[in-house]
Amino acid sequence: MLHKPFGYLSQFANNGPKKGKKKLLGELYDFAAGTMAIGRLDEKSEGLLLLTTDGKMSELIRSQKIEKEYVVQVDGIISDSAIAEMRKGVEIGFEGKKYQTLPCLVKAIPDPQFPLRTQKIRDAKHGPTSWISVILTEGKFRQVRKMTAAVGYPTLRLIRVRIGNHHLENLKVGEVKKVDWVV
């Protein structure tokens, strides 16, 4: 398990056009050869990332059999109707097509008091924010961000806190902990 910091790509090699300018997971720890991230968190997202050298394990964990939970700070005080829409599933863009997300669990939560991230979100003078918990069994490209935007509440901060039975808990930002997978 790794607590992925804000500003890092969920990969170990960068072959893109800006390859020298991006921070990669391999800069955080001396991982075993062949280590790969199971699923991804985009550069602006934080939280729990499982790593493995086992491709079959990666496939299982990325499947719809395993829940992934995110804590999300959104712009504005999210309405009950927006939460209900997200629960039912919303239409988002994915690979150039429209996609209807699967029903999921969404609820408003109090501010989880996470440590401040390295880049400031914004000042309170720009208006209120609120927090939600989103539990999915799928994981399309930037799905949670697209879902909150689709209901009118753009994501300001996104932290994955759980994959299956593994919880972020008190793992410090950038910290790695060896775990055995338990479904």
Image: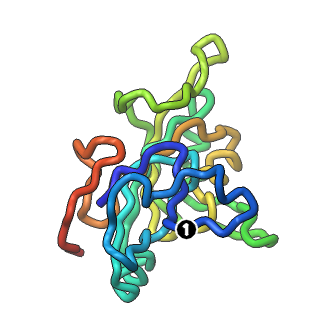
Q: In the rendered structure, which amino acid carries the disc numbered 1? A: Ala
Camera-side residue of 45 and 156: 45
List x then y, in percent, for residue 169: 24, 46
Horizontally, is 31 left or right of 131 in the view? left
Camera-side residue of 161 and 178: 178
Q: Which residue, as the protein is rendered here, is positioned at the far bottom?
A: 56
| Number of marks in picture | 1
Residue located beneath label 1 in the image: 13
* Quadrant, the C terminus: bottom left
Q: Which residue is at 57% across, 45% downward? A: 44
Residue 87 visible in the picture: no
Disc 1 crowd rating (10 Å Cα; few below 14, some 14-19, many 20+) is: few
Q: Is residue 97 above or below residue 118?
A: below
List x then y, in percent, for residue 28: 38, 52
Q: Which residue is at 55% across, 49% downward? A: 84
Q: Which residue, as the protein is rendered here, is positioned at the far right?
A: 96
List x then y, in percent, for residue 166: 25, 61
Q: Is disc 1 placed on a helix, strand or loop? A: loop
Q: Is residue 160 above or below residue 172?
A: below
Camera-side residue of 31 and 52: 31
List x then y, in percent, for residue 32: 31, 73
Q: Which residue is at 42% across, 73% downward? A: 36
Residue 51 visible in the picture: yes
State how the image is colored. rainbow
* Quadrant, the N terminus: bottom left
Horizontally, is 76 left or right of 131 in the view? right
Q: Is residue 5 above or below residue 125?
A: below
